[in-house]
Every structure is written in structure tokens, then in C-alpha cells.
Image (tube, grey):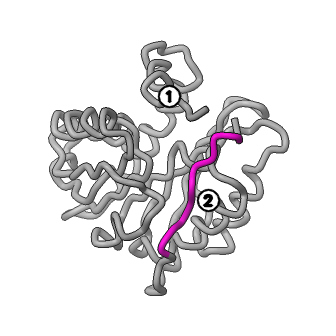
Amino acid sequence: MARDWIEWHRAYDDPASPLSQRLDAVVGIIRSALDAAPPGEIRVLSLCAGDARDISTAALDHQRARDLSGCVVELDPDLAARATANAAAAGTALAVRAADAGASDVWRDVLPVDLLLLTGIFGNIDDDNIQATIAAVPAMCRAGATVIWTRHRRPPDLTPQIQTWFTAAGCPSTDFLSPGATAFAVGAQRCDAPVTAPLPARLFTFRDDLW
């Protein structure tokens, strides 16, 4: 059975839920990245963005909100509509594309980016897809770009291996937040080694048997 992503988002209504706590961590890292960004455009790509609550919350009332461009990608049309409203309410120029974020043709025209959001993905794709997505990150980013990702830490905890894959791709860790060994994790990486190599046609495919 496919996951009901609309129902999944209802956990945000509870500020004590792990999902809300994860959102707070992601928003804090995004705002720090916006604070540190040089003047001018800040190009953003958010894959499997849901209702874009993370980037929209971070941008709300932030002095750099109007510098945000690029796009968020979400397959569910209802969530994509919410994302459009949230991005506009936050004062950003982010476009919303209701499409399959795993297909690189959907978003390659906005590359390279300064901020890449891979939140809510790594817990829903297999290990090979995670590694392939990380390997593609240097072809998606400008030098110094911030990459933010999330993953649960249920056994076997894959987060150490994810960090190793990022480091091997030229994206060292700048932050790692987690309330505990079996809870969620939020990681941030800095892309030090952007490349111009072609992207694969598909980075990942969601699987419903991983949760």
C-alpha cells in the first residue's frame, strides 16, 4: 500500500512530534545557510518537497527571502498546491513543479544551486539509490553550496555510511543533529568539489516496503 503523504503531513500539527522536531532542525540549518550566503541570488532546489514547509518557514520574515530562486519539486498535486501557497506567502520567487523529483530532467535547468534540500528522501529509497543520489550532488551544486538531508536512525543506522558517501563525493559534514540513536537525523554538508559531469536520467525511486 502506498503511503498517504497528506496524512503523514498531519504530524506537523503536533509541535511535540518527531516530525515537527525534525522540521525545526532543518529550518535552523537553512536559516544559518541564508545568513551566511553572499549578496545576490540564492538558487535553491528542494526534491520531494512536500508542502515546502521547511524552506518556506526558514524564509518567512528572513531578509534574504526575496533572493531565493529555483524550484521545489513534489509529485502529489495537493501538496504541490500547498507548496506554491507557502512559498509565495514567505515572499520567495521559488517555483513549484508537480512532478517526479527522481527524474533529473524535471529540475536540471535550475542547476547549479546554492542550497540543495534532500529531506524526507533517504528513508524512502534503497541504499544503492542513496549512494547514487549523493554521487550526483557535485553535479548539482555550486562551490560552497549547502546540502541538507534527513534519515531515520533505526537499526541498522545508515547515517555514518551516508556521511562517508558525502565525504567521498567532496561534500564534508558541517552539521549533524539527532536527538538519539534510534530517532531522526538531520545532516548538512558543504559541496567543495562541484563538477560538470552529466547527471543520470534518474537518481532514485521511492519504495513503499522500507517503512
Majority secondary structure in the magenta region: loop
Q: Answer with left or right where residue 71 lies relative to residue 3.
A: left
For marks 2 and 1, give the one nearer the viewer.
Answer: 1
Quadrant into which the C terminus falls: top right
Q: Quadrant of residue 113?
A: bottom left
In the structure shown, which secondary structural element does the residue marked by tag 1 occupy? Answer: loop
The location of residue 31, given as percent across then percent down, is 37, 43
Q: Residue furthest right?
A: 156
Tell me the residue at 43%/15% (across/down).
Answer: 13
Q: Tell me the residue that label 2 is attached to.
A: 173
Q: Residue furthest front?
A: 1
164 or 52: nearer the eye? 52
Q: Answer with left or right where residue 37 lies relative to residue 95.
A: right
**Residue 31 painted magenta:** no
Residue 84 lies, with reference to residue 46, above or below; the image says: above
Question: Mark 1 Cα within 10 Å, few/some/many (few <14, many 20+)?
Answer: few
The location of residue 103, given as percent across then percent down, is 44, 64
Numbered range of the magenta stretch: 201-209
**Residue 203 painted magenta:** yes
Q: Is residue 194 visible?
A: yes
* Mark before the other along the chain sequence, 2 or 1: 1
The location of residue 1, given as percent across then percent down, is 61, 32
Residue 73 lies, with reference to residue 57, above or below; the image says: below
Tell me the residue at 44%/70% (across/down).
Answer: 144
Q: What is the spatial separation of the Cα atoms under label 2 and label 1, in whole angstroms?
A: 32 Å
Tell me the residue at 36%/70% (across/down).
Answer: 105
Tell me the residue at 51%/76% (across/down).
Answer: 200
Mark 1 is on which residue type? Asp
In the structure shown, which secondary structural element does the residue marked by tag 2 occupy? Answer: strand
Mark 2 is on which residue type? Ser
Q: Tell me the residue that label 1 is attached to.
A: 4
Instruction: Check residue 132 in the rendering and tell me which mark sits there, or answer none.
Output: none
